[in-house]
Amino acid sequence: MSRLGAACLALVMWTPLAAHAQEDAPARDIETGGKLKLTRGISTIEGQGGGGLTPWALITGNETDRGVGGAAHVTAVELPDYTFLSYGVALGLFDRVELSYTRQEFDTRDVGAALGLGRGFTFGQDVWGAKMRVIGDAIYDQDTWLPQVAIGANWKKNDQGAVVSAVGGTDDQGWETYATATKILLDSSLLLNGTLRWTNANQTGLLGYGGNLNDDHELMGEFSAGWLLSPDLVVGAEYRMKPDNLAIANEDDWVDIYAAWAINHQVTLTGAYVDLGSIATFDNQRGVYLSLQAGF
Amino acid sequence: MRTSLACAVATILFAAPAFAQPASHVPPGEEAVDPYAVSDANAGAAPVGGQELFAAFHGHEGISRIVDDLVEQVQKDPRLTEIFKASDFVRLRRTLKEQFCYILNGGCSYTGRDMKSVHADHGVITAEFNALVELLQAAMAREGVAFSAQNRLLAKLAPMKRETVTR
């Protein structure tokens, strides 16, 4: 896990920078900080501000409509047969636009040997994302049902084109677009989110894009709910539908239960229990998700 | 000083019975304000139903403690120094208590001005609105108000951002 170590080190180095940026805020024309805790969301495994597996309409970073913010994250998911790692950075502009880059690495451990790829064979991919808030305010619009709505797109590039082809994947790179709506019902201390994603990614793209069963983009629903327990703590669950494009292996929807704790305005720690179903013929991939996010 | 002089002049000008508004008398310890039409609608939100939330805030005494605590923290918070520099804290405490009591269905009348005119010249930004929310959350927590009950009041106050945040 030396990559995880390096990513954690980067995150630790980022934190004082982030804190420093906030202290300097009053003297600058472009402001930083000002969001309420947890309202920037955490970082998804694909780098957007959101939940852990699915994006929210909230824009990352602590900035308000007058400034810029950002977040860096490291996420590790330990499964029975695989280890998944995601780390990246994201920028929030004027609480309106979010730009993100995330690196994903999927270590096949012993499965790699079983599949003839070699023990510890690792799929990797880069995810570039952009998201824009188009209407509504999830937090302040408490007198209307209108949610905060954002639209976004991701472009993803997988490192292992040859293996992707071998398992029946059509492309080693792909794009997806999504619309996401977030509503915080303060009256009942609830956060609700729904996302529609137009995608043909196999296991988020780690097994490529499109396949011998289906090449086309399809609409996938993703849902999450959170119960606000304190200004610093939210617990909830997520559900993410996924395509099933490869003949070689069945792909399941994902589900998790999570708790996210804003240690302070800069750092949020999230733990979850995830059920990622069957991945590359290895069933019951249930395990622990841990994510550390630092932002300003 | 210039402001209080202007207010004094305004008070004298409008003190004639023909112009008198229901709230034109100045409570002890408060500075005079320009006359305005007094209405519960100025509170900016309709009261909640039932007595349960008022009880969760420990009634008039609880609201009073929360507002006193909040105003004390506001005066100490460097993020809010500019915004509250010219504030009449005696009046702020009274009108905030009225506003919270009215919204929590505690049977009070709100006699303050509407949110838009109160904040018109303050140039409040989102970060300052949020800073005040944080201080209020802390004050409610110190009073022992359950987080879910805190959020029911915040749900009433949150839309006021549209009228209070002006830049």
Image (cartoon, rainbow, N blue to C red):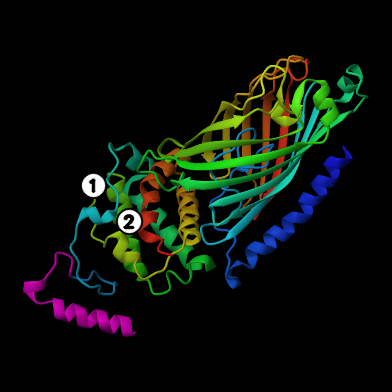
Label 1 crowd bin: few (<14), some (14–19), many (20+), radius 10 Å? some
Left or right of A82, for residue A234: left
- Any part of residue A73 in sight: no
First to last magenta residue range: B1-24
Q: Is residue A111 magenta?
A: no
Who is closer to the viewer here, A50 or A252? A252
Amino acid at pointer 1: Gly
Answer left or right for A293 relative to A4: left
Which of B69/A257 is in front? A257
Q: Residue at x 28, y 37 (%)?
A: B49
Q: Name the dominant secondary structure of the magenta segment.
A: helix
Circle 1: element type: loop
Q: Is residue B76 above or below residue B100?
A: below
Q: Which residue is mark 1?
A: B107
Residue A18: where, in percent of width, then height? 69, 58
Residue B123 in percent (x, y) is at 41, 68
Q: Residue B22 in magenta?
A: yes
Query: Subunit of mark 1?
Result: B
Q: What residue is shown with label 2?
A: B97
A240 horizontally vs B161: left or right: right
Q: Residue at x 46, y 38 (%)?
A: A183
Classify mark 2: helix, strand or loop: helix
Does residue B140 appear left or right of residue A253 in this picture? left
Quadrant location of the C terminus of chain A in the rendered image: bottom right
Position of the N terminus of chain A, as image quadrant, is top right
Upstream in the sequence, badge 2 or badge 1?
2
